[in-house]
Image (cartoon, rainbow, N blue to C red):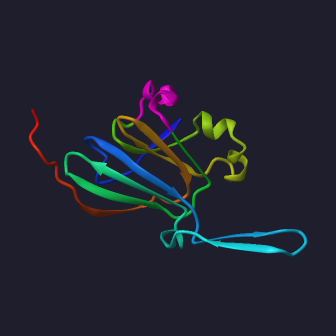
């Protein structure tokens, strides 16, 4: 397995995945007889395949992570990636990897042109998101979100 850094504003500390949106700005189905249906999707997906919102505890900030072109993605419990936790991976919330079991076992590895694309990994306390894509996602801060009430 090969690792590479993937810098993000939430690479250290505690991060939480709030939601994930996969889609397109317009979905089209054309049948062999020429009949067609078009359904409007979310406008946010005009040039973006996958949108992930992440809350970072230490900065009390909500971020939007936008992946333009995605070949595959999966969201799973961290227990599904035990081979990563036992490896010499970067000890951060965000990093890149290639040459691991999902790349090796998946037919995607053939479509990716000899394993040239990286998986971008986002690790939280609850889930792990793995996205196979050529380019790192665009990350933007949405807003600050402050804790309210008293901790007792």
Image location (x, y in percent) of residue 15: 31, 44
Quadrant in the rendering for residue 122: top left
Mark count: 0
Question: 35 or 81: which is nearer to us?
Answer: 35
* Residue 70 screen position, x and y as percent: 58, 57
Q: Foreground: 27 or 136?
A: 27
| Residue 95 image-quadrant placement | top left
For this view, does 129 lie left or right of residue 105?
left
> Of 54 and 132, which appears nearest the observer?
54
- Residue 81 part of the magenta-drawn span: yes
Image quarter (top left, top right, bottom left or bottom right) of the C terminus: top left
The reply to whether residue 47 is in sight is no
Q: Is 26 positioned to the left or the right of 68 in the image?
A: right
- What span is colored magenta in the figure? 76-89
Percent position (x, y) of residue 126? Answer: 39, 35
Residue sticking out furthest to the right: 33
Would residue 150 be seen by someone viewing this image from the given angle?
Answer: yes
Q: Residue at x 71, y 52 (%)?
A: 111
Q: Residue at x 33, y 40 (%)?
A: 92
Please state the horizontal and vertical placement of residue 138, each as a whole percent of the image: 41, 63
Quarter of the figure with residue 4: top left
Q: Answer left or right for 136 relative to 12.
A: right
- Residue drawn at x 61%, y 33% as measured from the top left: 101
Look at the image and say whether residue 62 sits in the magenta stretch.
no
Q: Residue at x 58, y 39 (%)?
A: 99
């Amino acid at each position: 397995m090969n690792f590479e850094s993937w810098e993000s504003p939430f690479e250290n500390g505690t991060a939480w995945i709030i939601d994930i949106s996969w889609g397109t700005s317009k979905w089209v189905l054309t049948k062999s007889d020429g009949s067609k249906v078009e359904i409007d999707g979310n406008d946010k997906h005009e040039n973006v395949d996958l949108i992930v919102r992440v809350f970072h505890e230490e900065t009390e900030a909500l971020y939007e992570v936008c992946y333009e072109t995605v070949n595959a993605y999966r969201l799973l419990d961290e227990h599904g990636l035990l081979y990563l936790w036992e490896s010499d991976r970067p000890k951060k919330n965000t990093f890149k990897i290639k040459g691991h079991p999902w790349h090796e076992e998946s037919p995607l590895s053939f479509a990716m042109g000899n394993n040239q694309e990286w998986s971008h990994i986002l690790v939280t306390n609850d889930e792990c998101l793995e996205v196979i894509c050529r380019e790192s996602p665009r990350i933007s801060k949405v807003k600050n979100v402050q804790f309210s009430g008293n901790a007792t």
